[in-house]
Image: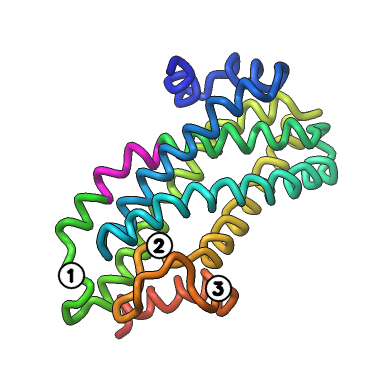
Amino acid sequence: MNNVPALCRGSRALLQDWLECNPARSLSFCIPAIILGCGAYGFTMGMWQGWTMATYVAIKFPLVILATLLVNGMINGMLAMALGSGIGFRQSFQFLLAGFALMSIILLSLSPVALFVVFHAADPTDPGAGQLHSIILLSHTLMITYAGIVSHSSLLGQVRDFATSPSHGTRTFFAWLAGNLFVGAQISWIMRPFFGSPGLEVQFLRDDPMNGSFYDTIWKSLMNIFIL
């Protein structure tokens, strides 16, 4: 438990220890943190459609983060090498793992806020639920994006120090951040639903997971709120 405040402070000693020692030490902390934090936040996302959806999302949301971790762990390693940072695959994976663990802790702290919104929202069967769905989608997108940016930003200094030069570290960091946001968003789209669309049945996964994209849905939600 002592690792929680140290990680939230962006402790260089903690990250240095994780980078230089057996990876099992960081995995034994970060993986449970991801499961707990994202599971709790996922539960609050699904509660709008009831207990069944909440249970589904509590399972799925940590899986989205772990899938993003695996995919971007490889991509980030290649980006780090291509950008001349001197950071290897294992170190890239470790930075990403620490970032997602901190993001999960932030999301855990935001779970009561998300649950408050759900309990005060109109029922999914009420008139106007389509616009409410758009608002909920954008709200969760903003909160998750905020948690991701804040958590990864706490690692910027360490990445700059660990790289061959601060400029190489900065370029590598922002390439990682863009890749994490893009891949994470699309994996979440494939593994939808997370709070369910009004009029559609509660499912663990949609029958057409590859149809459409996350970004198209965000655009339509914005149009639904501000135009229609």
User: Which quadrant of the figure has residue 140?
Assistant: bottom left
**Is residue 64 positioned above or below 189 on the image?**
above
**Magenta span covers which residues?**
106-114
Expressed as whole percent of the image width and height from the top left, the position of residue 78 reads 81, 46
> Label 2 is placed on what type of residue?
Phe
Describe residue 72's horizontal placement relative to residue 88 as left or right: left
Pointer 1 local density, CA inside 10 Å: few below 14, some 14–19, many at least 20? some
Find residue 194 and name its label: 2
User: Which quadrant of the figure has residue 39?
Assistant: top left
For the N terminus, give its image quadrant: top left
Looking at the image, tell me whether mark 2 or mark 3 is earlier in sequence order: 2
Q: How is the image coloured?
A: rainbow
For the C terminus, give its image quadrant: bottom left
> Label 1 is placed on what type of residue?
Asp
Residue 169 versus residue 145: which sits nearer the camera? 145
Residue ID for mark 3: 209
Q: Can you name the residue that lies furthest to the bottom here?
A: 228
| Residue 108 lies in the magenta stretch | yes
> Label 3 is placed on what type of residue?
Pro
Q: Main secondary structure of the magenta part?
A: helix
Residue ID for mark 1: 123
Find residue 141 and name its label: none
**Is residue 95 positioned above or below 180 on the image?**
above
| Residue 150 lies in the magenta stretch | no
